[in-house]
Amino acid sequence: MKALGSVAAVVAATLEDADAEVDAIDREAAAAIAALPRGDGAADRPEDTAAIAAARERARIAIAHEDWEDARAAIGEREAWLTRALEIGRRRLAIPEAPAPGRDRLALLAREAIGRLPAGPIEIVVAEADVPLLDADWRSTLAPNDAAQIAIVAGPIEGGLLARTRDGRASFDNTWTARAERLQSIWRAASMSGWA
């Protein structure tokens, strides 16, 4: 089976194939009708014409159903591939990295999260292994005028971080899992560019 692109392309290809097969069946039926003997007038009876039309409709429906099943299978294969690619990406993100890249990546995530929260004291929840990376210097890069506004807390996080106001009224989840969900349309489009 060849790889298919977007859902719209799959549908268009399916309809095109179905139309071509219906045309071929129509030509075969017309040739068979033309070959019928005309001596007894059997080919001219309304019930024969209705039977031929019904046979054509059954053939058209069978072909369309087969094409639909092929398209569904192709979409299923694509979704399975995306699931495998996402799992590989998650495993790669779980591999511990050197402190400097880890600090820099967490700083980017923290800036984005803090920018989505109201001003005031903030808690940044990270994985236990990431806590030692986030010292006072790191906090001062996020809040140069008042690093004490930022507290680092260990929590059940597999990667990335969660930022929240200290009173717990507002939070922004910037964990890898939340980012994968939030940015799904972007990473799906990028991943699928190689599929078509």
Image (spheres, rainbow, N blue to C red):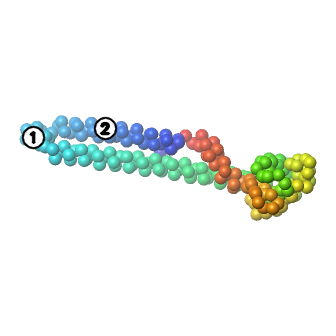
Q: Nearer the viewer, mark 1 or mark 2?
A: 1
Q: Residue at x 56, y 52 (%)?
A: 80
Q: In the shown orientation, is residue 106 left or right of residue 183?
A: right
Q: Quadrant of residue 52?
A: top left
Q: Nearer the viewer, residue 185 or 166?
A: 166
Badge 1 or badge 2: first in the primary sequence: 2
Instruction: Indicate the amino acid at tag 2.
Output: Ala
Give the secondary structure at mark 2.
Answer: helix
Residue at image coords 69%, 55%: 177
Q: Nearer the viewer, residue 35 or 49?
A: 49
Q: CA distance from mark 1 to mark 2?
A: 26 Å
**Where residue 166 appears, x then y in whole percent?**
82, 60
Q: Which residue is mark 2?
A: 24
Are there few (<14), some (14-19), or many (20+) residues within 10 Å of tag 1? few
Q: Amino acid at mark 1?
A: Gly
Q: Position of residue 169 (x, y in %)?
A: 76, 60
* Residue 101, percent from left and from top: 82, 48
Q: Is residue 116 above or below residue 26?
A: below
Instruction: Give whichever of 66, 121 is nearer the camera.
Output: 121
State the residue position of label 1: 41
- For the point 9% across and 40% down, the residue is 41
Circle 2 residues within 10 Å: few <14, some 14–19, many ≥20: few
